[in-house]
Amino acid sequence: MEIYRLDAAGIHKTDFPHYKKDKGNSYCLIMTPEELVESNKHFKLHESTVQECLSPKQYPRLEVYDEMCFGVLNIITKQEDEFNLTELNFYITQCCLMLVTRDDSRLMDYLIKETKQSYSKSSGYVATPSKLLFLLLDKLTSMDSTILKDIESRIAELEEEVMEGRSGEFIRDIITLRKQLLFLKSYYEPLLDIAEDLVDNENGYIEGSSIKQYRILYNRISRLNSNVLNLRDYITQVREAYQAQVDINQNKTMKFFTVITTIFLPLTLIAGWYGMNFKYMPELDWIYGYPFVMALCVLVVAISLIFFKKNNYLD
C-alpha cells in the first residue's frame, strides 16, 4: 500500500499509522484489492464494493453514496491491432482518494509529476482528491485522439485501395477496424456516464473549482465518443464501396459470359440444325456445303461482335 499526504506544499509519501492519526489533511492511497480487504476494518467501506474490487471484470460505472463515491474504470493499452483493458477501482471522499488496482507501478508517478507542474504554474494550487482524480481521468483520454486519427488514416487508406481496385487483405482489415471501433464505443459510453455523474456532484465531494475541469473532461469524452460513431459510419461506407466494386467486377464477368453465350447461341443452333442428318437435306450433298456453313458461322460471329460493340456491350 502506498499512502501520500496532500497539502499546500505538495504530495508527501507517508505510512498507514500516520494516516490513521491525521484527521486534518487529505490523502491519496494506492492499494491492491487484497490490501483493501485487509484494511477495510478501518475504512468501513461497503462490502459489496470491496467484493467488486476483487473481481477483475466489472462494468465501468460510478456509484454515488452519501459518504463516498465508488467508481470502476478501464484503462486501455494498445498492442499492434488489439486493445487490452486494465481495471481500476476508486473511492473518493472529501479528504481521500483511494485507488484500487493490480498494476499501480506508474499511477502515482504520473500524478506526482502532473501535480508538481500544477504547483509550479500556480502559487495557490493545492492538491485535493478530486483534482487528482481529474488528472487520472485526463490521463486516460489525453492521447485517445491520436488513436482515433490512426484509425481514420487506416480507413482512408482502405478507401483509396478500393478506388484503385487493390483489395488485398481488405476484409481482414475491415473486420479488425470494426472490432477496434466497437471496443472504443463500449469504452467511451460508460466513461461518459462516469464524467457526467462527477459533473452532477450529487454528494458535493467535487469542489467548485474542479467542476469546470470535469465539464471540460466530459466534453472531450463526448467528442471522442462522437468521433468513434462517425468512424463507424465511415468504415461502413468504405465497406459498402468495396461491396459495390465487387458487384461491378462480378457484373463485368457476367456481362462477358453473357456476350460469349449470345455469340455461340446461333452457332449452336446452326450446329444442331445441320446435325439432324435427315436423308434429303440438300446441303449434305452440296460440294460447297461445309465451306458455306463455316462462312455462315464466321458471318454470325462478326455481325454479333459489331452489334455488341456498337451498343457498348464489350466495354
Image (cartoon, rainbow, N blue to C red):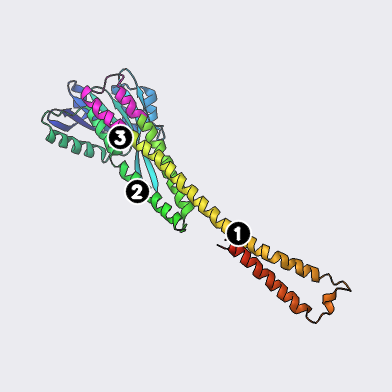
Q: Is residue 68 above or below residue 190?
A: above
The residue type indicated by label 1 comes to Lys
Crowd rating for badge 3 (residues with CA inside 10 Å; few <14, some 14–19, many 20+): some
Which residue is painted at 22% across and 39% down in the image?
Answer: 109
220 over 295 or under it: above or below: above
Q: Quadrant of the N terminus?
A: top left
| Residue that numbered label 1 is attached to | 255
Type of secondary structure dominating the magenta stretch:
helix
What residue lies at 36% left-to-right and 22% top-to-bottom?
A: 46
Q: Earlier in the sequence, mark 2 or mark 1?
A: 2
Image quarter where the C terminus lies is: bottom right
Q: Which residue is mark 2?
A: 150
Of tags 2 and 1, which is closer to the observer? 1
Magenta stretch, residue numbers: 193-219
Q: Position of residue 215 (x, y in %)?
A: 28, 28
Q: Tell me the SS state at disc 3.
A: helix
Residue 107 painted magenta: no
Q: Earlier in the sequence, mark 1 or mark 3?
A: 3
- Vertical order, 72 against 263 (above or below): above
Residue 284: x and y in percent read 83, 77
Q: Residue 41 location in percent, x, y?
A: 31, 22
Query: Residue 44 occupies which quadrant of the picture?
Result: top left
User: Does residue 303 appear left or right of residue 59 in this picture?
Assistant: right
Q: Is residue 148 visible?
A: yes
Q: What type is the residue that disc 3 sits on?
A: Arg
Looking at the image, residue 269 sits to the left or right of residue 152; the answer is right
Is 190 placed left or right of 254 in the picture? left
| Lower position in the chain sequence, tag 3 or tag 2 | 2
Query: Which residue in the structure is indicated by mark 3?
Result: 220
Residue 176 appears at what percent x and percent y? 44, 48
